[in-house]
Image (cartoon, helix red, strand yellow):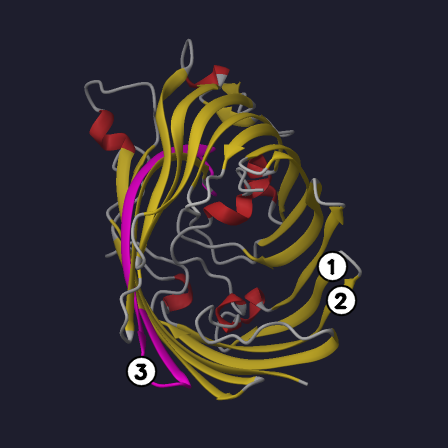
Amino acid sequence: MPASSVLHRLPPVALLAGAFWLPSAAAATPPEEGMQLLAGIGWAHDDNLLRQVDGAPAFDGQRSDSYRTLEAGVVYNKRISRQRIAATAKVSKVAFDHFDQLDYDGRDLQATWFWDIGSQFEGHLKGLSIQTLAPYTDFNSDQRNLREQRRQEFDAGWNMHPSWKLRVGAARDKASYELAIQRFNNRTEKTFETELLYQPRTGSAIGLVARRVKGNYPYRRPFIGSVLLDDFTQDELKLRVNWLASGATTIQGLAGYVRREQPSYGEGATSGVNGRVSAFHTPGGKISYNAAVWREFAPIESPFVSYTLNKGASIGASWFASAKVTVEANAIYERRSYTARGDFAGADALRDAIRSASVRAVWQVRPKVQVVAACVHQARSGSALLGTGKFDANVVQVGANVLF
């Protein structure tokens, strides 16, 4: 269910030590039946680990640091008649060379039941719990700030006609933070949606999606002698499109009208076009391409505000250098507006932009053994009114993982 999960709205380059070691979509082999053990090891160096602003004094006189990641876990995949169970349980240990107060134990627990009843009814039930270090992109501190994310989701579809499908879904996302100063970003989002989907024989599809998202922030954010109520209600009516434009090009999108009510941020509500459109081009060679544009609301891990309205674009390419080596390159530009109530004098001071670029190489040494290397660049322009400034950061990562 592609709802407003916090997992889908992470910053372009988050400080998520260990997340980099996930298998490449291009290189990964199909999951095997039964249970497999997994293990991984990695090393990374970040020249601005805590995303310190240019010209500001560095924490402990140092901006850069290296960290090591060890991972271990279990992967389970089993088909029982028409049902399928997929689960992953992974733990990690991350240790920093200099800022050792950030050392932490992470976890990634996920399980999904893909259910199927006859030829007309299908769907899935999923739960996950992830604990990792929150990014420091919008938070100035050298203290450890663990983020715990939990999600439960249910999706059910009724194939009421060979070309028509009715689908309903619900999800609950919860995010909580370790540091007291970040507790104002603790939140629970509940999403309910229904969709009428038309799927002609061409393989393309178009659906009408109606969705409501209710957000609750249990801790009120202090603001100039008062408190801000970050709770919100967001109603959406969108078109979902999966268009097979040609044998090599696919265009996917979920976009339409959105109305968001959040009382603490001005009278009335924010409304307008919102969504994301992606394109994938895979010609008959060794290179494939992808691109996306979006305009959508997203939570932000800032002490001052709870959400931004983001407008962005990305472009990427994958080069299948050989049967075992894949190289992926991506560039992202995203402009964030901290007030969505419209333009006014001084509104530019409540905006910033984040740029990121990455190159990632995956060597599939054996069907169950991967070696991965990546370089990442991230830069933020800063918001003068919020007191955030410009920074640049560069990360180099190498690692290996194995299934057995």
Give the x, y percent position of residue 180: 61, 43
Secondary structure beneath dot 2 equals: strand
The amino acid marked with disc number 3 is Ala
At horizontal 50% and vertical 62% (from top left) the residue drawn is: 16
Give the x, y percent position of residue 15: 46, 61
Q: In this view, does 176 lie above or below 35?
A: above
Secondary structure beneath dot 1 equals: strand
Give the x, y percent position of residue 122: 69, 44
The amino acid marked with disc number 1 is Arg
Badge nearest the viewer, 1 or 3:
1
Q: Does the magenta stretch include residue 203?
A: no
Which contiguous range is marked in magenta?
301-328
Left/right placement of residue 40 relative to residue 16 reads: right
Per the image, the residue denoted by label 1 is: 84
Asked if one can make out residue 343 in the rendered structure from this viewpoint, the answer is yes
Q: Is residue 146 above or below residue 35?
A: above
Left/right placement of residue 11 relative to residue 209 reads: left
Q: In this view, does 292 lie above or below 97?
A: above
Asked if disc 3 and disc 2 are in contact, CB closer than 8 Å, the reply is: no
Per the image, the residue denoted by label 3 is: 321
Q: In which quarter of the image is the C terminus?
A: bottom right
Q: Does the magenta stretch include residue 317?
A: yes
Q: Nearer the viewer, residue 332 or 324?
A: 324
| Disc marking residue 78 | 2
Of marks 1 and 3, which one's residue comes earlier in the chain?
A: 1
Of marks 3 and 2, which one's residue comes earlier in the chain?
A: 2
The amino acid marked with disc number 2 is Lys
Which quadrant would residue 52 be assigned to in this image? bottom left
Left/right placement of residue 35 relative to residue 148 reads: right
